[in-house]
Image (spheres, rainbow, N blue to C red):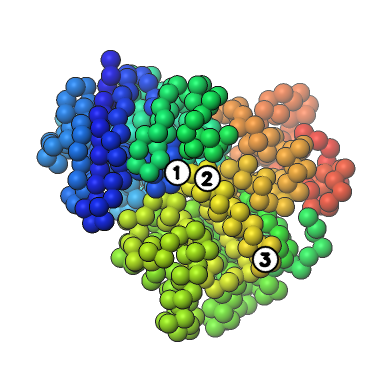
Amino acid sequence: MNVLRVTDLTVRHARDDVRAVDGVSFEVGANETLGIVGESGCGKTTLALALMGLLPESAQVEGSVRLRGEELLGRSDAELSRVRGKDLAMVFQDPLSALTSVHTVGDQIAEAVRIHSRVKRAVARARAVELLDLVGVPNAVRWARAYPHELSGGMRQRVVIAMAIANSPVAIVADEPTSALDTIVQAQVLDVLRVAKEAAGAAIVLISHDLDVVAGFADRVLAMRAGRAVECGLVGEMYRQPSAPPVRQVAGERCRPVVLAVDALVRHHRPLRKAGTVRAVDGVSFDIGEGETLALVGESGCGKTTTLLEIMRLSRPERGRVVVFGHDTATLRSAHRRALRRDVQIVFQDPHASLDPRMRVASTIAEPLTAHGMPSSQARVRVVELLDLVGLDPDHARRFPHSLSGGEKQRVCIARALALEPRLLLLDEPVSALDVSVRDDVLTLLEGLRERLGLAYLFVSHDLAVVHRMADRIAVMHMGRIVEIGPVDDVYGAPAHPCTRALLDAAPLTQAEPPDAATLLKGCRFRSRCPRYATLTADARPACEVHDPLTRRVDFAEDAGWSVACHHPLIGAGIER
């Protein structure tokens, strides 16, 4: 039985007379997943919003959308509100925007339950905790009392999924639900969606630019281009013999001046409402040479983004030391700090949240230029140059963020970061929101800029294929610490730490979820999830249970920078240092 049937769906934007969706038709049956793929701006998200009835009033929507035989198009917002969240649910790409910042996540999930069910508040709150536990949030009772900004990106996405499945919907629209997650959390989130599909027999429409995700999760795939459906078929057939371009596109030296040195950096969070201390960054050390790229990888919530933000503050850290271009940030005066910000810029993971919705693209890119004294006339010329540099037309300068696709928003953010010609760029998942073709263009751009301008990159990513392409060295983080660091080819070829091996293999760990960061284990923090620890003899285990592993150089490493923090590494490690 077809749960969701879309017939000749067309969406026009009256403002510019553009057909964002042009005559798309498909069907999704019970317990079936349809994957929708295509380039950034091809109409995927517009299609999802049309299914949910969430497009602005200025959009002209034609065709038919039937849920279990009942027509949804043409219904009032009040009528659709009785369907949305109950029979038809959506998982948005940007979990931070999908959640309300002033309410706890538990209250928001409970609200989704109470809107469609006549239950008492206490029952709804208990159900919220059950849902958080179901989607893999550790210590669900405690995190139900947290606010969205206190959660990592991966944790927020799980909360959004919990809200989506709260009322056992018959159809779920998931718009890039794993685009900002590392490989392990990505697999766990997909498992949660799979459980929800099987439990309720729900139909799932999965929108993604990651064709590996679609291939491993969907039953059928629909490829879109310029608003139209150009190919549709079974996943196996489409990937063996693709005919449409959107599917076919799938198929150093260490003696350098140091531009960034981080030594024993610490950032602990002590929430007033909760017991315990969250060791977001707990003794991180590394350095980056001129023109070098160091990739920082690890599971969602391990402290990667916090590390970037601590560096970007250019101020005295809680503990430890940050030295940028030879300047200790703890000793910088205000004027010197402002001048140094020209040389250090950041591209955030979430382009939607990092753009002011009230500012046009031109004003957004020009803001750092005018803030540092460039005349407006020169800034306007520079804006056009930057738009061309990141592959956008000059016409984009007049647009507001809401009229851009996710990929276009991120390119605007990159243009803004490049405006002042920095020497060090901090990149927090810069291509996670982009489809494969645009992602390749942006990575090629970043590679070219590094070679031409001698830029250094601190590159945070969960996409290990991107890391292997971009990075000279890789640092693997787990629960606020670096557990392995070394040349990218060496670490990928023979990882020394079990956590690194799990990330590279996307392997299931002994314990499905990471332990609560506020209640750290004594000894090795990774042991409760470590496949190697599970195979050790009783005589070998005490070291892992009692002592925190020190960093040791890998025995046969030609580069002294390859080290691992593990009592029983997968390959040999020498004397402690």
View extreme (top): residue: 1
Q: Secondary structure at mark 3?
A: helix
Give the mark nearer the N terminus: 3 vs 1: 1
Across and down, in percent, residue 315 comes to 57, 71
Q: Amino acid at mark 2?
A: Ser
Q: Identify the residue at horizontal 32%, vertical 23% (top origin).
A: 28
Q: Secondary structure at mark 2?
A: helix
Question: Residue beneath label 1, please?
Answer: 39
Q: Quadrant of residue 47?
A: top left
Question: Residue beneath label 2, please?
Answer: 437
Across and down, in percent, residue 511 comes to 57, 29
| Image quadrant occupied by the N terminus | top left
Give the mark nearer the N terminus: 2 vs 3: 2
Across and down, in percent, residue 73 comes to 17, 35
Q: Identify the residue at horizontal 59%, vertical 27% (top origin).
A: 508
| Mark 2–mark 3 CB contact (< 8 Å) | no
Question: Residue beneath label 3, please?
Answer: 452
| Mark 2–mark 1 CB contact (< 8 Å) | yes
